[in-house]
Image (cartoon, rainbow, N blue to C red):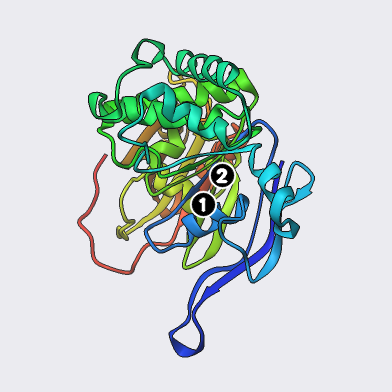
Amino acid sequence: MITIDHVSRRFGDGPDAVVALDDVSIEVKRGEIFGVVGQSGAGKSTLLRTVNALERPDSGTVTVDGTVITGLEGAALRQARHKIGMVFQHFNLVGNRTVSQNVEFALEAVGVKGDERRRRALEMLDLVGLGHRANDRPAQLSGGQRQRVGIARALASEPDVLLSDEATSALDPETTRQILDLIKRLSGELGLTVLLITHEMDVVKRICDSAALMERGRVVEQGRLAELITTPGSRVAAELFPVGEPHRIPGHSIVDITYADLSADRPVIAQLARDFEIDLSILGAAIENVAGVQAGRTRLAVPDASTTQVLTALRAQGITAWEVQAPDVQAQEVTA
């Protein structure tokens, strides 16, 4: 649905030039929610803006539903943008217009006439649960309600793609959860393809099917969350399931195991200890619901002599397991 192919963007010239995007390639499949995560300055917003040509890349192409957006100008570009809705971080509502009129504003640009414009605006407000606030002003709404208006406005032109630019970063945790759940519900009900950017892993964890991690204008890792979770050494998985930095323990190897949809009543670690008659220490653990399944990571200290046996036994059960290289520093002896 969205193909970003070797896109680069540089601001300025000479030694002071800023490389915002450096040969970025991402593919978002139809109907999925794809999250681009990274710290400020990673290039996320610039990337998002290339999808609706608010930002033009220096090289590379962006294709949306078969149309090469980077090759369009004038009326053709305006027409293509009608199928791409965008939700902003700071709502961008017009204060002297009612809630309904703010949603209608998006329809004025595409030539929808008065009665039809009003009908569709009310339909969108009902969809986001704000039909009863249609005649209020934005100042009368909470932050979460204003963001719902922003979503209704973005959906008014019946787009196939929804872009979300840090849409929840200005909201409190509970309101953030409500907005994310709304986006996920609307994606399912309307068949929307959603590309969102965020610096919060909790956003990715809650609603995304796939994700890409960006640093300094480059994509350093991407894929389906279900696959990244069980990829040894995945940085996305490590951010989703933080278990701390590994520390070397004399006489022990550090082993990480990750799993998805593993039944909680399987005493995997206890069974290993019994089978091999060894002491296993749990150094850290995290369990979350990601991409609709329960998944997690556990870090173990395993006696050196038993490491190969333990890794083989875990993998035989369909559990991803690998040895983690820890800094060579002195640590206290770990007991079971």
Q: Nearer the viewer, residue 263 or 303?
A: 263
Q: Residue at x 43, y 32 (%)?
A: 150
Q: CA distance from mark 2 to mark 1?
A: 6 Å
Task: Establish if 188 lies above or below 233.
Answer: above
Spot occupied by residue 70 in the image (x, y as percentages of width and height) = 70, 58
For residue 314, say whether it is visible: yes
Disc 2 target residue: 228
| Left or right placement of residue 297 versus residue 330 in this view | right
Q: Amino acid at mark 2?
A: Leu
- Looking at the image, is mark 2 or mark 1 earlier in the sequence? 2
Q: Kindly identify which numbered label has been placed on residue 234.
A: 1
Q: Which residue occupies the extreme front position in the image? A: 114
From the viewer's perspective, is 244 left or right of 226? left
Toward which corner of the image does residue 325 lie, by quadrant?
Answer: bottom left
**Tag 1's secondary structure?**
loop
Residue 49 screen position, x and y as percent: 54, 54
Residue, x 23% and y 24% (percent of image)? Answer: 140
Residue 308 x, y percent position in the rendering: 53, 50
Measuring 30% from the left and 59% from the top, which residue is drawn there?
247
Q: Residue at x 20, y 56 (%)?
A: 332
135 versus 13 height, above or below: above
Q: Nearer the viewer, residue 45 or 223?
A: 45
Image marks 2 and 1: residues in contact by CB distance under 8 Å: yes
